[in-house]
Amino acid sequence: MDAAPYASPMPLLTARGVRKSVGEGRASRLLLDGADLDLEPGEIVAILGRSGSGKSTFLNLVGGIDSIDDGSIEVDGRRIDQLDGSGLTRYRREQVGFVFQLFHLIPELTALQNVTLPARMAGTVPDGAARAAGLLERFGVAEVADQLPHTLSGGEQQRIAIARAMINDPPLILADEPTGNLDPAAAATVLDVLRGIGEEGRSVLLVTHERDATAIADRVVKLEDARFVTG
């Protein structure tokens, strides 16, 4: 297990007054309107809300994939909404790991190669292959390290995707419907993995439609009327 020394008296994530609209003109729709959220080091927060309410949009804002219209987002003491393109690239490579509903593994690469790829791109993990192998072992998928994604079950692919998200040792994991494509047994295994990530000191922001997934969370919030409320 990684040491992950992320304990801090300050929240890892602080979002204040976040506004975000999509579309243009008369088709414009306000998804976030003064949204506030804190995420403590080692805390798992689950976000619930109806489809299209802006849950995934908020994750994309925190992940530096999209930009806010107004407000502020601070991660580990840094205003990511003020970073330029190169700063956002470094942030995404070093500070945050992404886990998606559809896994997004590269089909031509083996499980081990998929996990190792972000470390190779960042150039900051010299022992990337060894670290990747260790993560696959930890998550119970070491035996499929040399297999291509299409030969694996959904649960195996998602555990590989989580290993990939952790390869650069980020303090923050963003998980967007990580169990949405899994059967109950595979979903339970993936949720156990995410719970373990929180227990080692990383923060996890979990977007889900599934009440079962909220059982691993330390706190549940709902996105209602473009703002977060305690669930």
Image (tube, rainbow, N blue to C red):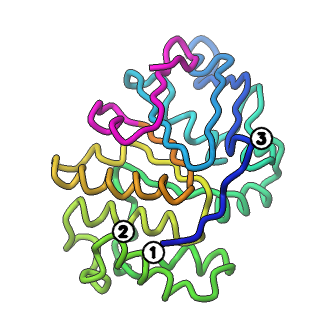
Q: Which residue lies under the disc numbered 1? A: 115
Distance CA(mark 3)–CA(mark 1): 28 Å
Closer to the chain start, of discs 3 and 2, is 3
Secondary element under disc 3, as helix, strand or loop, is helix
* Quadrant that contains the C terminus: top left
Q: In this view, does 28 lie above or below 71?
A: above
Image check: 71 left or right of 169?
right
Q: Give neighbour class at mark 1: few <14, some 14-19, many 20+ (Cα, 10 Å).
A: many
Q: Give the range drawn in magenta.
A: 208-231
Secondary element under disc 2, as helix, strand or loop, is helix
Q: Is residue 226 magenta?
A: yes
Q: Nearer the viewer, residue 78 or 152?
A: 78
Q: Nearer the viewer, residue 45 or 97?
A: 45
Secondary element under disc 1, as helix, strand or loop, is helix
Query: Residue 15, percent across and down?
Result: 70, 32
Q: Which amino acid does label 3 sit on?
A: Asp
Q: Are marks 3 and 2 in contact (CB under 8 Å)?
A: no
- Which label lies toward us, 3 or 2? 2
Mark number displayed over residue 160: 2
Q: Which of 24 and 198 is in front in this view?
A: 198
Q: What residue type is labelled 1?
A: Val
Q: Which residue lies under the disc numbered 3? A: 81
Q: In this view, does 177 lie above or below 185?
A: above
Counting every numbered tag in the picture gives 3
Closer to the chain start, of discs 1 and 2, is 1
Corner quadrant of residue 157: bottom left
